[in-house]
Image (cartoon, rainbow, N blue to C red):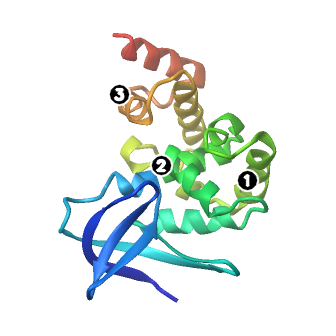
Amino acid sequence: MYEYIKGKYIGINKDYVIVENSGIGYKIFTSGATMSSMPKNGEEIMLYLEQIVREDFIGLYGFDSKEELEMFKLLLTVSGVGPKAALSLLSISRVNNLKYAIMIGDEKHICRGVGIGKKTAARIILEIKDKLKPDELVDSSLEIDTKDNENVMALSEALSALIALGYSEKEAESVLKKIDKNDSVENIIKNALKALMG
């Protein structure tokens, strides 16, 4: 029913933002990633929307990119994954990194989402993996050659490994930009750790 909303950003609550449009304050549930991109109160924002209607609930879900909205909708196609779980996954991982994790079958990364157990993580991988295209799995900020899927896989595994070791996605991505991406996964991880530990 709704494609997007443009309006004045009013503020953040626990799991939603408030956007005012034509004198009405809209409660829009969203991910941590979108929340982190919010401007100062009173500034204009635009969010891409998905409306979910159930017997006892009507809610608006909004994201600052179409890519994140599409990933949210894709996650909802998985049996047992509701809006809260989908938002949780999009809050602990950027869209491309979540796609990487699904592509390489990284259950541990997916289980970081609140309420996501091993069975649900396995189901997400099983049901979504084949729907993702290789060219969608490349994070442009990491400057990977999209023609070389082995590079994509190696970098994805290295990224997941660094996150599993306790480094933030931002730290991991930053150091991986400086590493030779044509090397083996093992060497990429070793070199990244050397750089991170100074």
- Residue at point 46% right, 25% down? 167
Residue type, mark 2 in image: Arg
Residue type, mark 3 in image: Lys
Residue 77 location in percent, x, y? 71, 67
Mark 2 vs 1, N-terminal side: 2
Q: Which residue is mark 2?
A: 94
SS under mark 3: loop
Residue 78 location in percent, x, y? 74, 62
Q: Residues within 10 Å of mark 3 (few under 14, many from 20)?
A: few
Q: Which residue is mark 3?
A: 178
- The residues bearing labels 2 and 1 have C-alpha atoms spaced at a distance of 16 Å
Residue 168 location in percent, x, y? 44, 31
Q: Residues within 10 Å of mark 2 (few under 14, many from 20)?
A: some
- Residue at point 81% right, 45% down? 119
Q: Which residue is mark 1?
A: 124
Q: Along the horizontal axis of the image, is 141 left or right of 183?
A: left
